[in-house]
Amino acid sequence: MSINITKLVELAHSNAVAKGFHTVDPRASDHRRAVLTVGLEVMEACDLIEQIRKQPMTHVRRRGIAEDLPGGAQLHLLVALTLIATEVSEAMEAAMESDLDHCMEELADVLIRVGDVAGWIKANHELLDAPAPPSLEAAVLVKIEVNKDRPYLHGKHV
């Protein structure tokens, strides 16, 4: 089955609504707690990136991040994933300013970067000593089906 972006948005959003991710009153303390929880997860990811950035390359290589790979493929992948996070943060800034046109533009950038990274992974999986992964489209379709069977709020109580 093939899926277009409009259909993806409809499927993803309807499942998120069904699983309770858009039912929180923005004025309620639960909403602020949810934002804080997500913020903490983002901070943990940023801490990991900062730890990698601060390490001397010899230490990074010892940990296997760039171990004898042309151009340090794993490190390249980490940087590419970080660029996705920068686009998300730009979308968050636009949303905080209620600039929804700019927010959608940044979300488009997120999709573009995700597509780029997925294409890079498909083309370079051998550099990571990994088998060929499924296409992004196939992974999205599988994940949508998995998410349909997950519990309300994925079992988390924010």
Image: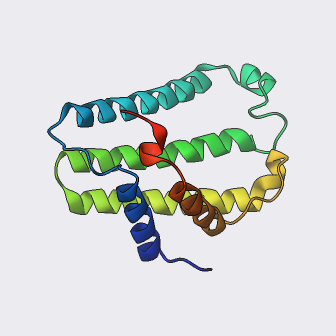
* Residue located 39% across and 33% down the image: 157
Count the marks: 0
State whether residue 31 is above or below residue 129.
above
State whether residue 45 is above or below residue 24.
above
Residue 55: percent from left, percent from top: 64, 20
Judged left or right of residue 126, residue 135 is left
Picture quarter with the C terminus = top left
Using the image as rendered, state which of residue 126 and residue 70 is in the foreground.
Answer: 126
Using the image as rendered, state which of residue 147 and residue 71 is in the foreground.
Answer: 147
Image color mode: rainbow
Whether residue 108 appears in this view of the structure is no
Residue 1: percent from left, percent from top: 62, 80
Residue 151: percent from left, percent from top: 49, 47
Give residue 2's quadrant in the image.
bottom right
State whether residue 56 is above or below residue 121.
above
* Residue located 26% across and 59% down the image: 102
* Residue located 40% across and 70% down the image: 10
State whether residue 80 is above or below residue 146.
above
Using the image as rendered, state which of residue 149 and residue 24 is in the foreground.
Answer: 149
Judged left or right of residue 131, residue 50 is left
Residue 18: percent from left, percent from top: 38, 58
Judged left or right of residue 107, residue 118 is right
